[in-house]
Amino acid sequence: MLFQSQFYVAVFLPIVMGCYYAAAHSERARHWVLIASSLFFYTWWDARFLPLLLGQIGATWFLTTYHRCSSSLVPLRIGILLNLASLATFKYLDFIIDLIEAAIGFQLPRANFVLPLGISFFSFQLISYLIDRMRGDAPIYPLRVFALFVLVFPHLVAGPIVRHNELIPQLVLNPLREGVYRRLSTGFIIFTVGLAKKVLLADRLAPVVDPLFKKAHLQMLSLGEAWSAGLGFSLQLFLDFSAYTEMAIGTALMFGLLLPENFVRPYLSSDIREFWRRWHISLSTLIRDYLYIPLGGSRNGPLRYVLATIVTMSLCGLWHGAGWTFVAWGVWHGSGLVLHRGWQRVGYPLSKMAGWLVTMVFVLVGWVLFRSNNFATAWAILSSLTGSNGYSGALQGGTTLVIAAVVSFFMPSAHEIKDRFALPYPALAVGAAALVVFCLLEVGKGAPSNFIYFQF
Amino acid sequence: MIDATGTAEGWKRFVTVFLVALSGSVVCVYLFILLVDPYGIIPFSLPFERRIVSISQAFVYPQIVLSKKYDSLIIGTSTSRLLDPEYLGGRFNVRLANLAMNAMRAWEQREMIDYFGRRVGPPKVLIVGIDRVWCDQDADVVRHNPYGWPNWIYDDNRWNDYLYLFNQPTVEIAVRLMGNKLGLYRERIRFDGFEVFTPPESTYDLDRARQHIWQDVKPETSSNPTLLTLSLAEKASLSFPALKWLDETLQSLPISTVKVLAFMPVHIAEQPWPGTKDAAVEAECKTQIVEIARKSGSKVVDWRIHSPITREDVNYWDNIHYRLPIAQRIQQELADAILKGKDSHDGSYHILVR
């Protein structure tokens, strides 16, 4: 079920909220309401993967409980391996077979598994819990609460990636506690912002971007087409993913839960490090804490820093998809981070504007790699961006691009809206309601389109 | 209790206003759509005469069928849209509706004939304007036109239509319909489906038409066009998926239905060049259509030939669309050919099955 669908907004959400608040005083009852609704939400797409999801949750919980009895770390290590194995099987098996094939030189059969929705997100969440448990930073939770931590539908499919200590303490709080109307109001506003970004901007950029990437698969683009593709996808990806996050955070707030911030206007970054502090924050902090720092981080000499950064970012790329273009995207960003650090050491700081420009061009090149199905397509667009195929052509979807850029640069983040911009003005309530109705009418034109990050 | 940016009472009012405004707007808009029922398809809408105020043909034509004012139909693509059902209905002595649509795919034509049969009963007269879409080898892959095809309207469940009506185009058409009732908005298509969609004849410009007709056309020639035929193996490898649907549809109609297949007269620039493989493939498709027609007792008239009509640029707006006087000639020739068995005096058409 998609957040922007008429069914979600007009049927699912009101019914679940009604049941949840009716059961607000009973922790057990409201937990079951959330679990049941989350399972319904997940199976709406594909019920076949429910056993996998429940299996991973159940196995992780069982192994951590067993670890408490045995005090050996083996059960936790097995838990990490199980979650990694599930991810490897469903997401990377064919990629691994490709590698073996290239090494041995003859064809092997493919698994052709359908990617279970949200597997990258819930697997990482479970792994982070197991690692925290190994570090002695995580208690054993009751199964119901633990399952809910993973299942709760606002973040289940595409994040933000939530850690146990961020969410579980909130699950015991009565949603009718002080501030309920403010939480509901800010939830409505943040959800509306996400809905409008998805329906009115991100989905309107897709018809500009998709044909151009398809065309680049076969031929070079004109200068105008190449920049339309690059800029268009950069904006589309941000608006699409941040819209999903805002709808997730908005929905969670309606249930009295606060999910972590995921995007803080990343396209205002004036260096690549700042970009990663503003882009997909829940993932970047997760890989920082569980990968980059254990690999040595920045405090064990320059060589170790370079290695840790490149390996971390390559795996970050691979997390997004089983393909070499994703790995290359990760290496590109890892190299950027290393270069940035090196430049800082040299001591010739760029002006804010020059830094922003360099960063944005760097990020755009990365997004072209990220979006392209293969290196030939990426090369066709990247070389066309420099004018190698002539200087003809105009920007396509100009007005939409400009509006999308303005919104991307200046729209406050979900938490900023919550803390600073959501004000209890009745006019704002009417405006938000009107925007929701307008978006629902827009969505009703055809089947609502998926979020880009659902494929990861 | 004071919150950081407002009182608890203020936030409570915000929630109330938001929920009332949202639910109120959704209910009002939806109720308006249901009462006006711009597509004339749902049960329990306001009982008033609905005119066609939108050119979204796939959405608005079903109400023509549901009105049960018509017992016969014309189907096809835009090349059949200028056939006036009033004239042809008079000649055939039936109540005829023209349900041909722009870029209508073969599958959709079959769906519309089937829908008519389910809602009204077998037509007294069925005229199918045959175009390239019936001979497309990917007809079963590309089943729908690019403008959208609402399967939910054409199914047997009228109750599921409620799920698809809350959208911006439907609101817009409902508003137009109200505008039409108040005399503020004109009817876009006559209720029998007829619309002169070509520009006014007074604006016709032959040079411009020639640009449209001949752009992108590269005539291919063969040294000996008459001898180019397909081998048995080549014929066997050809597949015309839509012809199976045509066969099934025609077979399903009773013997009493007058069934007419009319190959519509597109300009020679649009027809495959004689002697080419495309021409041979089209000839094979025609042959198979004629066989299908014979089996079902249908009549076949062919204007899709090199003729005084299709050779003259001045008869066309572009390579597909003929002008209004030609439309009037074709509908007259069609009636004469079917009702009187009259052959063309100048070779503009051939009667392939009488």
Image (cartoon, coloured by chain):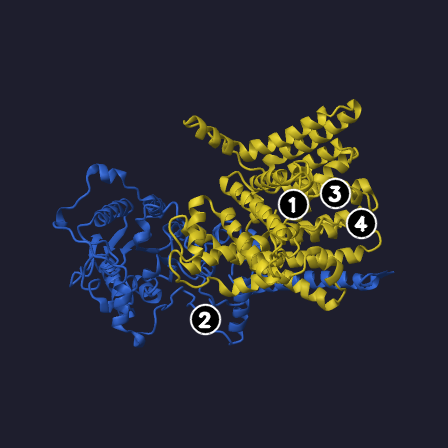
Q: Is residue B352 left or right of residue B179?
A: left
Mark in front: 1 vs 2: 1
Check residue B187 in the rendering and tell me which mark sits there, or answer none. 2
Q: Colour of chain B?
A: blue
Q: Is residue A262 left or right of residue B182?
A: right
The disc, 4 or 3, on the residue closer to the chain's N-terminal end is 3
Chain where mark 2 sits: B
User: In the rendered structure, are the residues bearing label 4 and label 3 in contact, judged by CB atoms less than 8 Å apart?
Assistant: no
Residue type, mark 1 in image: Ser
Q: Residues within 10 Å of mark 3 (few under 14, many from 20)?
A: some
Q: Is residue A63 above or below residue B323?
A: above
Judging depth in this view, the residue of B325 and A442 nearest the camera is A442
Q: What residue does disc 4 label?
A: A175
Q: Measure how far apart labels 1 and 3 are at the Cα level.
A: 32 Å
Which quadrant does the C terminus of chain A fall into? Answer: top right
User: In the rendered structure, are the residues bearing label 1 and label 3 in contact, judged by CB atoms less than 8 Å apart?
Assistant: no
Same chain for labels 1 and 2? Say yes or no.
no
Which element type, helix, strand or loop, lies under badge 4? loop
Q: What residue does disc 1 label?
A: A284
Judging depth in this view, the residue of A356 and A400 nearest the camera is A356
The disc, 4 or 1, on the residue closer to the chain's N-terminal end is 4
The disc, 1 or 3, on the residue closer to the chain's N-terminal end is 3
Residue under the image location 58 percent in, 57 percent down: A199
Q: Measure how far apart labels 4 and 1 are at the Cα level.
A: 30 Å
Residue type, mark 3 in image: Val
